[in-house]
Amino acid sequence: GAVVSQHPSWVICKSGTSVKIECRSLDFQATTMFWYRQFPKQSLMLMATSNEGSKATYEQGVEKDKFLINHASLTLSTLTVTSAHPEDSSFYICSARDKGTGKYEQYFGPGTRLTVT
Amino acid sequence: DQQVKQNSPSLSVQEGRISILNCDYTNSMFDYFLWYKKYPAEGPTFLISISSIKDKNEDGRFTVFLNKSAKHLSLHIVPSQPGDSAVYFCAASPYNAGNNRKLIWGLGTSLAVNP
């Protein structure tokens, strides 16, 4: 149980284009989904927290107009990197909390490797 | 300001022996602690958690100990297996975080279990 998928697993795009990453909870409903970014040999950096049907809460220093988050249902959240630049190249990971258990554990997707050329 | 600290960036252990990964925290509002395991280019996998009302939680080969007075927790893996080789992250959640309960992460400890 508690499986989270991400799509795509890797993507290469040209500078200036936009990329959408999907995060789905496959066998549970997620009250809250989180988006992280990980740079090489560094810890996870929380970018934003999203709740179904409401606006995402962004962490300090994260541009909300650049990283658009939509949480349209209890099983799907999307992150769109708009007007991507090479410095946006990173490993993006989503996680979700299970609405049914009420526990604080987050279950993570496998991540998406974004390379902007 | 690192609120969750994993002071050992790496640890090497012989197969079959005990692995002890340590984590210290500074925020007294943390009331829930979690350990995750992560392989390169994959998302973290939840291992075990502990609430601040407990001092020990055990799940198979994994045991987490919490010392609230010292603001210290540790993850014990017994016996260690080569497949345990990964980066282990300690994370904590403050009780004043609201319903979203975001996690504060340590920088990770890379564990190598040698055959």
Image (tube, coloured by chain):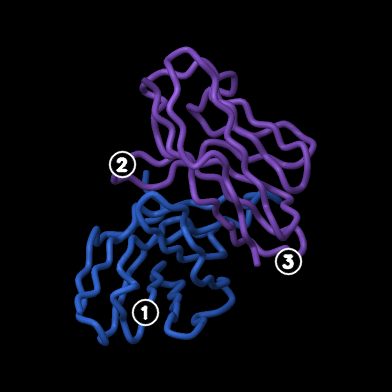
Q: Do labels 3 and 1 share a chain?
A: no
- The disc label shown at residue A40, or none: 2
Residue at screen point 56% across, 41% down: A35
Residue B55 point in image, percent of width and height: 50, 80
Closer to viewer: mark 2 or mark 3: 2
Packing grade of label 3 (10 A; few <14, some 14-19, many >=20) is few
In the displayed structure, does residue A78 sit left or right of residue A113?
Answer: right
Q: Which amino acid does label 1 sit on?
A: His
Indicate the chain on which mark 1 is placed. B
In space, the residues marked 1 and 2 are separated at their CA atoms by 27 Å
Numbered circles on residues, count: 3
* Chain letter, purple: A
Residue B49 point in image, percent of width and height: 53, 70
Packing grade of label 1 (10 A; few <14, some 14-19, many >=20) is some
Indicate the chain on which mark 3 is placed. A
Q: Assign a secondary structure to mark 1.
A: strand
Closer to us: B36 or B68: B36
Q: Assign a secondary structure to mark 2.
A: loop
In space, the residues marked 2 and 3 are separated at their CA atoms by 33 Å
- The disc label shown at residue A87, or none: none
Residue annotated with mark 3: A101
Residue annotated with mark 1: B76
A52 lies above or below B12? above
Image quadrant where residue A65 sits? top right
Closer to us: B113 or B93: B113
Closer to us: B68 or B90: B90
Quadrant of the image containing the C terminus of chain A: top left
